[in-house]
């Protein structure tokens, strides 16, 4: 009996030391992250977030589809798939990884998201008569999503780069910045940690009302690619004044 108690005590001490070590190393606690959608953006971000130790739930309207099952296998053992509302209900962070034109309607369909972080990587653009893209909403998709889920903490991020760069950040050939906008400081910190865990540089650019500027950044990014001059965003940090 004494030996059993001693073994248990030793294990508790070891676990405590491990937890203290993780905390001192600045390693964030694992979250459950729902990726609503299973397209290119979800297929890029899901495996990357899983590598950081987070539990991934893909929200799909067709969870048994072959490509969804392939994505599940590629993401790893801490991944599962459920209906979209069920995935969102089980998550700490909900990623709206659907086309921008349907993002608000999809958000409304997910039920009560109060208290959750919503990561919005979407863009909504339209073609001008000269063939170039332009911003298609008066404010921003992020603010419309916030209005659709008023109790949630919406963070705009991951909307200014190609999904291929999300899949393999090293393919950019240099540093890439993820600008982040939102009204909740803790939510922005947690989203920044996801970006930095992928090897990106995250920069907080202020409240959610500036999300329209990030969406405009995507507009000129697309137009530059159309003109044959593609680029990635890197905002070089300066020393604090």
Image (cartoon, rainbow, N blue to C red):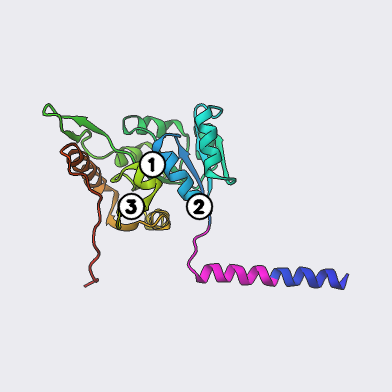
Label 3 and label 1: CA atoms lie apart by 12 Å
* Residue marked by disc 1: 150
Q: Residue at x 69, y 72 (%)?
A: 13
* Residue marked by disc 3: 183
Q: Residue at x 74, y 72 (%)?
A: 10
Report whether 189 appears left or right of 232.
right
User: Is residue 1 among the parts visible in the rendering?
Assistant: yes
- Whichever of callouts 3 and 2 sits on the residue coming sooner in the sequence is 2
> Is most of the magenta stretch helix, strand or loop?
helix
Q: Quadrant of residue 131?
A: top left
Residue 126 part of the magenta-drawn span: no
Instruction: Report the magenta residues as a range.
Output: 13-29
Q: Nearer the viewer, mark 1 or mark 2?
A: 2
Find residue 104 and name its label. none
The secondary structure type at the circle numbered 2 is helix
| Above or below 73: residue 237 | below
* Residue marked by disc 2: 51
Report whether 203 appears left or right of 9.
left
**Residue 218 coordinates in the image, percent (x, y):** 24, 42
């Amino acid at each position: 009996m004494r030996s059993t108690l001693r073994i248990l005590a030793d294990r508790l001490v070891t676990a405590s030391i491990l937890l203290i070590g993780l905390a001192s190393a600045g390693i964030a606690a694992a979250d459950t992250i729902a990726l609503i959608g299973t397209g290119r953006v979800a297929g890029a971000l899901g495996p990357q977030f899983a590598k950081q130790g987070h539990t991934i739930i893909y929200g799909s309207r067709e969870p048994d589809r072959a490509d969804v099952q392939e994505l599940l296998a590629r993401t790893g053992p801490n991944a599962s798939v459920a209906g979209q509302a069920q995935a969102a209900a089980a998550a700490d962070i909900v990623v709206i990884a659907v086309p921008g034109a349907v993002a608000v309607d999809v958000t409304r369909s997910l039920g009560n998201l109060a208290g959750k972080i919503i990561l919005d990587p979407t863009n909504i653009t339209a073609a001008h008569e000269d063939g170039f893209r332009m911003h298609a909403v008066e404010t921003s998709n992020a603010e419309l999503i916030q209005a659709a889920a008023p109790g949630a903490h919406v963070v705009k991020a991951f909307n200014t780069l190609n999904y291929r760069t999300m899949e393999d950040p090293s393919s950019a050939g240099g540093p890439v910045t993820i600008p982040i906008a939102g009204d909740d400081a803790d939510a922005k910190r947690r989203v920044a940690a996801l970006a930095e865990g992928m090897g990106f540089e995250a920069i907080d650019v202020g409240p959610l009302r500036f999300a329209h500027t990030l969406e405009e950044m995507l507009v000129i990014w697309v137009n530059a690619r159309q003109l044959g001059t593609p680029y990635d965003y890197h905002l070089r940090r300066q020393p604090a004044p």
